Amino acid sequence: MRIEWLLALRFLREGRAQTFFMLGGVTMGVGVIVFLTSLITGLQRSIIQKTLGTQAHVVMRAPDDEARRIIRPTDSLAVSASVERRAQRLRSILQWQQVMRDLEQRPDVTAVSPLVAGSSFAVRGSASKSVALMGVEPERYTRIVPMSTFMKEGEFRITANDAAIGMDLARDLGATLGDKIRLQTADGRDETITVVGIFDVGIRDLNHRWVFITLRSAQNLLDLVGGVSSIDVTVNDLFKAETISEQLAGQTGLVAESWMKTNAQLMAGLRSQNASSFLIQFFVIISVAFGIASVLVVSVIQKSREVGILRAMGCTRRRIQHIFLLQGAMVGLVGSLLGCGLGALLVTFFARTALNPDGTPIFPVVLESRMFLVAAGVATITGILAAAAPAVRAAKLDPVVAIRNA
Amino acid sequence: MPDMTREKTILQLTDIRKQYGSDGVITQVLHGVNLSLQEGEFTALIGPSGSGKSTLLNIIGLLEQATSGSLRMQERETGTLSEEELTRLRGRSIGFVFQFHHLIPSFTALENVMMPLMLEEGRPTPAQRERAAGLLARVGLADRLDFKPAKLSGGQQQRVAIARALATNPPLILADEPTGNLDTAAADEIFKLLYEVNQESGTTFLIVTHDPRLAKRCLRVIELVDGRIVS
Ligand SMILES: Nc1ncnc2c1ncn2[C@@H]1O[C@H](COP(=O)(O)OP(=O)(O)OP(=O)(O)O)[C@@H](O)[C@H]1O
Ligand SMILES: [Mg+2]
């Protein structure tokens, strides 16, 4: 072992209480950071998971009809750029099969599913409810939204005139498996379907409104024969959805909207949560650094005689400086390892106690090795930086003064 | 006795002056000291309190710098050396024995003796351990290797300090009142030990002492009064 390490270790061991306090400070600080980070990561993941449980990562649809300007702009006349938009009728995506094939070629796209969506009324007996028609190819759609995992009764296997409806709609209409329901659109088209599945996606509004039918039924009902209104896309990296959606729009000439844009408010919330958690972590680190520095400053004064002796025996200033920097580094590293342990313990404990009424944890425990590595690295560097001022001070000690004041 | 015909100059001081304080009150402590020490000499430095003995010793030991004058260590001018070079030269060429032993409390006797060697070589080695154990045996502490300084008597602590001063086998050992803190019997023992080491290894010694009895036993006595050498 190098002499610097030997001396640093010996000094730390000798200053028992001081070392204990420094280690304690780092342990608590890192523990809090680990706990906070995994709590926030876990919460955010579960929020995003819940949000995306019923949404495509990217939705692509045909561009809006261009509204034409009535007045031609001239050099002398300034014209308002905002022109009232026309009411949009349901438009099909041109050559949607080809577009889907193209999208499937991309390595960052993991699933593609066509959708014919529109509104209609669901009528059974005297009950009539406004619903959202979802014309899908079930096998494809399941890879966008995992409907088969949401089924309460029956199955998400829709053919011909079958339909899957939400549990709240089923209750409102008094319908059970095998019952027939009439779907009726505003322009007078209608079709009778048979309920083959009842689902619960966990969102009441969707449980009230969603009616899944085949692509063909929806095309007939919504007067979109051979066409689709949108294409749902799943990508391999959730947080790249926005970037990918921009590329898809460019590639296809369609309008593409990512979940991040659709849920802009949620994203803003997550971002500000991240910012405030970063701020908290920053100040925790600063206060840990001050703790280490103030203890080491005292320790330098207490060790000035030893430092003087070492200098008299040929120990260079640089070496003295290293001895104190190493003490900071060791405290940082060891403290951060203890802190990671503490944080992991807290998180596990919290996950065990904070339970939903049904006994499942409120949020999944997220303990990643990357987080521990970062914590250890940051704490070690913090230790070194905190030790910098005391180390310089120790290196500057005059050996004559230190020896004379025995 | 060292061979007088092949005498070498270990240390050469020319017109060394030292003053403390920059502006305001200036205390001149050394007023032009000229002194040379030959290899193997065993010299006492005496003088009244405050005459500048410790200051002179610290300058010779490269622990502080003279305000003016030249200091040649083994024929080498030291005035132009950097702080780091001075530190290394000090580690190699000079052993210190202080009035208060100045051992490092958290290290054992053996580790304290190894310290100058560890500092020179950067890490502990078995060879250093062997040499340190040999030196401790030489000063009569073969059975105290693993004792911390606090567990040793004053005389024993000073023996460890002497063994430590010998560790790098330096040409010059400086001792500032090495017996000042000991009773007469222990002081005699330590003084005897220093003299024996000088005779065995030919190491040059410069010893500050207040004790005229001990000074008388040195072959050469230098007296410092008010920052000047008077004899
Ligand atoms: N750092 C300093 N600043 C100012 N004056 C100093 C300093 N160091 C020493 N002196 C003064 O220099 C003079 C000589 O001091 P020094 O310690 O060399 O004397 P000494 O001969 O060793 O005395 P003693 O026998 O008491 O040990 C004293 O008057 C002392 O006050
Ligand atoms: Mg003195």
Image (spheres, rainbow, N blue to C red):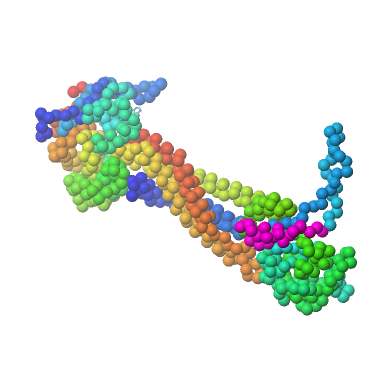
Residue B63 magenta-drawn?
A: no
Q: Residue at x 73, y 52 (%)?
A: A253
Could you tell me which quadrant the C terminus of chain A lies in?
top left
- Whether A192 is drawn above or below B28: the answer is below
Closer to us: A377 or A52: A52
Total number of numbered labels?
Answer: 0
Q: Is residue A354 left or right of residue A64?
A: left
Residue A205 visible somewhere in the drawing? no
Q: Quadrant of residue A121?
A: bottom right
Q: Position of residue A130 (x, y in %)?
A: 84, 66
Q: Residue at x 73, y 60 (%)?
A: A96
Residue interval drawn in magenta: A90-112
Q: Is residue A333 left or right of residue B123?
A: right
Q: Residue at x 82, y 72 (%)?
A: A172
Q: Quadrant of residue B139?
A: top left
Q: Position of residue A46 (x, y in %)?
A: 64, 61
Q: Position of residue A72 (x, y in %)?
A: 86, 39
Q: Is residue A28 left or right of residue B145?
A: right
Residue A110 visible somewhere in the drawing? yes
